[in-house]
Every structure is written in C-alpha cells, then in structure tokens.
Amino acid sequence: MRTLHARKMTPRAVADAAAVVARRGGIVIFPTDTVYGIGCDPASATAVARVFALKGRPAHKPLSLHLASVDQLITYAGNGELVRRIAGAFLPGALTLIVRRPPSVGGYVTAGLDTVGLRVPKHALCAAILQRCGPLAATSANFSGRPAFAGTVKEPLPEADLAIDDGPTPVGVESTIIDVSMEDVRLVREGAISRAMLERELGEIVFGHDERDHRA
C-alpha cells in the first residue's frame, strides 16, 4: 500500500493521485470529517467487490456514496422539501442520508437493496478528492466489526492501493445515519449528530433499523 502524507502536499496533488488510483479500479483510504473511509469508483463492480473483501464486510451490508457537494446529493436524492430541509441544516456534515436508490447506482454497491446512503463530508481535502475522483462508493476504513479509524493512518487495511494520511479526523466518530426513503424519518445510527439535534430541525423521528443495514 502506498501512503501519501497529505499535509506535505497540495490538496490538488493529493486529489490527482487519488483520482489516478480510483479511475483504474483501485482502492483508496481517505480522510473525512468523521472517520477514515475506504472507497472506490462506484461504476466498477470489481472494485466494489474488493472493498467488501478487504474490509471483511458482510455481503448484505451496503456501501454508501460519498459526494463532493450538496448539489450532487440532490441529483441522487431528488429536490424534495425534506431533503432540502436536511441539507440546509446539516450538510455538508456528519450525516448519512438513506434514500431510494436511483437507477444510476448499481445494486452491487448497495448489496442489492433498493436504497442507498449518501454522504457529503464537511472536510476540505475530502471535498477536493471527491471533486477530482467523482463519487466514491465507500465505508469506514476498518475491518468489519472493529472500531472505526479516526487517527493517523498506519495500516488499517494494508491491501488497499493508496492511503491518504491527513492526521486525526476533526470529528473522530462515525456519521449519524437517517433513513428518509419512507414516509417517516428513521434514525438508523446515532453518531456525531445527536437525535436531539435532528429533532430540533425535523420534529420527532423514529429510532430503529431493519435488514437494510447501512451501518459500518
């Protein structure tokens, strides 16, 4: 695994290096606002399968799409009133939004589910990487079932092709996940954004999850 020390490089140089790897079907470990992610080009079923294999991720657990901007998120999620409210209050930020999977997203990314998780991290270097690479199908950069990785990159998943070390992540805990694919807003995982913060903006939300498990 090749490691880049991002703080010794320009964001453009880091993003260019990540794009070269992702576009040839490689796997990239990259910083976000919450924890480090591991991701690939979502158009490559082979690369997505490698992410599952490297992480030891169960086949029924989907990856999410990490996006460079709220505008990109709206392209995938639609411009409904609820999405606009959530985006205005919390995005970019430590929130994953589960929405109906559009036809442009392969079922191999979402483990065959009809939903997809969308993330717009609030992290300048991550945004530069995503702008250069395009969306990345990603999950947290840790072996499945172990704690997510928020510190300096060492060898969290050494079989990845590229690791971008940007030091400790700003938030240090995983994103909160909410499901807006149905009539109610459902809290799947409480992370960096608390349930109380969500309810101040969105009203009462339902807590719980089912077989459509988008957690790390």
Image (cartoon, helix red, strand yellow):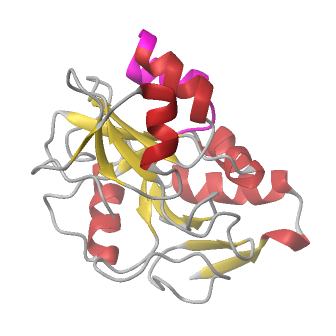
| 6 horizontally vs 25: left or right | right
Residue at left 33%, top 75%? 55
Which residue sits at x=58%, y=61%?
34
Judge from the rendering whether residue 166 lies leftward or rightward of residue 58; answer left or right: right
Quadrant of the rendering where the C terminus is positioned: bottom left
Counting labels gives 0
Q: Main secondary structure of the magenta part?
A: helix
Residue 4: percent from the left, percent from the top?
Answer: 73, 75
Magenta residue span:
67-81
Q: Is residue 200 magenta?
A: no
Q: Quadrant of residue 204?
A: top left
Q: Is residue 176 above or below residue 186?
A: below
Task: Work out which quarter of the rendered image holds the N terminus and state it.
Answer: bottom right
- Please tell me whether residue 145 is drawn above or below residue 58 in the rendered image: below
Mark yes or no: residue 15 visible: yes
In this rendering, does residue 26 appear at all?
no
Task: Locate residue 68, reporting x and y percent.
Answer: 62, 37
> Is 186 left, or right, of 168 in this rendering?
left
Report the residue at 45% width, 75% height from top: 148
Residue occupying the point 41% across, 10% down: 80
Q: Nearer the viewer, residue 147 or 39?
A: 147
